[in-house]
Image (cartoon, rainbow, N blue to C red):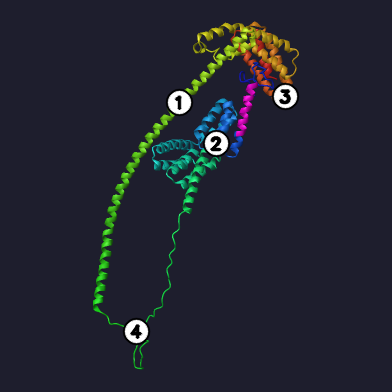
């Protein structure tokens, strides 16, 4: 954990050993951020994506530099089909932590596949078009567009919810249930999806109840039994002699020339109709095909016109989204500038109060923390009264703070043996060079700072072996900063040589 003011490594103390800042509340805030991150991770593992996203947003609200929370939030957004929001979180994470950041791998995964990026872009455009259709009550076009969107991006929860809502509007609750169940499979605790599902089940139960209350019509029965009827009449009631002959009813009849004539006429009519069908049908089919082709051409022309209009609308929507993003960026920048200005005024007030009470180190710490105090923008950024107060107390507070820090470091130097006490000595000596080092024996301060760094590294090898290398890197960075300051401010050549030799010695540890 590092100090929010000077980026030094913090210990268990309530104050930063380098700049003296009070970090009690700061540590609590970081701890709360990490707690929300752990809770969000637990929810993400059970696919409660919306709950995880809410907790992770809280985490980065407390600590915007919590890259673990930002990276996980990006993964949650990506799993919900929100690839653009995921990319935004990973880009912000990369800005806060440029090295050893998992966001690099996630972004490369997307950027290495241009087709996938194009598909994601098309998905966003098509969803916005579908949303416009739904608002204009063009439900059929909205459904077609949403099906295309979900075919390209099946995890887009907003797409499933909008499709279900359109079906519910049309009364197709059975169709509405399918996309809602898919959205809950992606995010099993999505509040909006659960609300839609409850409404669908309510209507389904009411429909089933209405079916049960309908009266049933009586069934009519018919007697399907057949009566027996003899096939032939044998004249059983008559008395037959041995010379009578029985002739069956279906007996032989001589041919009738009239019947054959009628039959031949019927066959001729059938042949004529068949010939007419086979001769005229191809022409009729050709005519129908021509009409069909003309209708297809007209429909294709209409589809091309509609596609052109859709493309124009998508371009307008994209331009509107870009303008909205640009305006939001300007608003965010303005809010950030406002927060910085408020913090700077608070630091100036605190510095002035400390100056009045002769707490020069506290005064100098707050003055040096003002964002643009040592930059060319200082004169243009602040009011005259602000600059006058800064200039009035700066020189005296910097001089007295350097003297006080040097005196305190010398008094602790001989008795400092462990990492904590040597860290305190090094921090106070570093502070001398942040302020007005020319008012002290700065060559002696350089030598004692070098020795304090060396002893701290040696003590760390025993007390904190896993952090010894970190203390070495801090020492070389601190001595390099001292060398830069005295070289820029016109320090003596002997002091510059001492600083150069000390830096070489620290690098060789």
Q: Secondary structure at mark 4?
A: loop
Residue pointed to by mark 1:
326
Mark closest to the chain's N terminus, 3 or 1: 1
Measure the alpha-carbon separation of dots 4 and 2.
Answer: 92 Å
Are the residues tagged 3 and 1 within 8 Å (C-beta)? no
Inspect this view and state whether residue 97 appears. Answer: no
Residue 11 or 91: which is nearer the viewer? 11
Q: CA distance from mark 2 to mark 1?
A: 27 Å
What is the distance, in whole Å, between disc 1 and disc 4 at their CAs?
Answer: 106 Å
Q: Is residue 227 visible in the rendered structure shown here? A: yes
Residue drawn at x 44%, y 44% as measured from the top left: 167
Residue behind mark 4: 248
Q: Secondary structure under badge 1?
A: helix
Q: Nearer the viewer, mark 4 or mark 3?
A: 4
Kindly give the residue lying farthest to the bottom in the view shown: 242
> What residue span does the magenta drawing correspond to?
24-39
Disc marking residue 464: 3
Q: Secondary structure at mark 2?
A: helix
Tell me the mark number nearer the camera, choosing from 2 and 1. 2
Majority secondary structure of the magenta segment? helix
Q: Position of residue 30 (x, y in %)?
A: 62, 26
Q: Are marks 3 and 2 in contact (CB under 8 Å)?
A: no
Relative to residue 255, is residue 197 depicted above or below? above
Looking at the image, residue 361 sits to the left or right of residue 116; the answer is right
Whether label 1 touches label 4, CB < 8 Å:
no
């Amino acid at each position: 954990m590092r100090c929010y003011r000077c980026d030094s490594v913090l210990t268990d103390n309530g104050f930063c050993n380098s700049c003296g800042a009070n970090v009690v509340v700061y540590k609590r805030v970081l701890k709360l951020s990490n707690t929300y991150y752990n809770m969000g991770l637990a929810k993400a593992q059970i696919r409660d994506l919306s709950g995880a996203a809410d907790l992770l947003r809280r985490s980065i609200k407390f600590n915007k530099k919590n890259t673990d929370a930002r990276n996980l939030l990006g993964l949650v957004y990506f799993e919900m089909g929100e690839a653009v929001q995921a990319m935004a979180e990973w880009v912000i994470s990369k800005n806060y932590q440029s090295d050893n950041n998992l966001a690099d791998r996630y972004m490369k995964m997307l950027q290495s596949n241009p087709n996938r990026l194009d598909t994601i872009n098309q998905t966003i455009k098509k969803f916005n078009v579908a949303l416009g259709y739904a608002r204009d009550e063009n439900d059929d076009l909205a459904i077609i567009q949403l099906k295309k969107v979900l075919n390209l991006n099946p995890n887009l929860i907003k797409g499933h919810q909008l499709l279900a809502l359109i079906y519910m509007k049309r009364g197709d609750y059975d169709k509405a249930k399918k996309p809602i169940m898919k959205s809950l499979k992606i995010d099993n605790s999505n509040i909006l999806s659960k609300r839609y599902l409850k409404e669908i089940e309510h209507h389904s139960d009411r429909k089933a109840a209405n079916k049960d209350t309908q009266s049933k019509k009586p069934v009519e029965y018919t007697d399907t039994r057949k009566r027996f009827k003899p096939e032939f009449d044998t004249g059983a009631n008559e008395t037959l002699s041995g010379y009578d002959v029985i002739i069956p009813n279906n007996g032989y009849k001589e041919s009738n020339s009239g019947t054959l004539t009628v039959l031949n006429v019927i066959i001729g009519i059938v042949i004529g109709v068949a010939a007419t069908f086979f001769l005229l049908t191809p022409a009729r089919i050709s005519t129908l095909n021509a009409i069909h082709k003309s209708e297809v051409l007209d429909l294709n022309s209409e589809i091309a016109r509609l596609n052109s209009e859709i493309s124009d609308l998508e371009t307008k929507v994209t331009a509107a989204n870009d303008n909205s993003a640009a305006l939001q960026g300007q608003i965010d920048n303005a809010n950030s500038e406002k927060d910085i200005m408020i913090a700077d005024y608070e630091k100036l007030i605190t510095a002035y109060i400390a100056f009045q009470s002769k707490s020069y180190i506290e005064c100098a710490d707050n003055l040096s923390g003002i964002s643009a105090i040592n930059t060319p923008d200082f004169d243009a950024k602040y009011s005259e009264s602000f600059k006058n107060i800064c200039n009035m107390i700066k020189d005296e507070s910097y001089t007295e703070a350097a003297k006080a820090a040097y005196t305190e470091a010398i008094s602790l130097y001989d008795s400092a043996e462990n990492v904590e006490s040597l860290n305190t000595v090094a921090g106070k000596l570093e502070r001398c060079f942040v302020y007005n080092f020319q008012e002290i024996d700065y060559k002696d301060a350089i030598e004692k700072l070098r020795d304090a760094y060396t002893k701290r590294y040696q003590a760390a090898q025993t007390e904190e072996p896993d952090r010894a290398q970190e203390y070495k890197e801090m020492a070389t960075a601190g001595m390099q900063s001292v060398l830069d300051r005295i070289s820029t401010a016109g320090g003596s050549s002997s002091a510059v040589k001492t600083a150069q030799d000390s830096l070489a010695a620290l690098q060789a540890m």
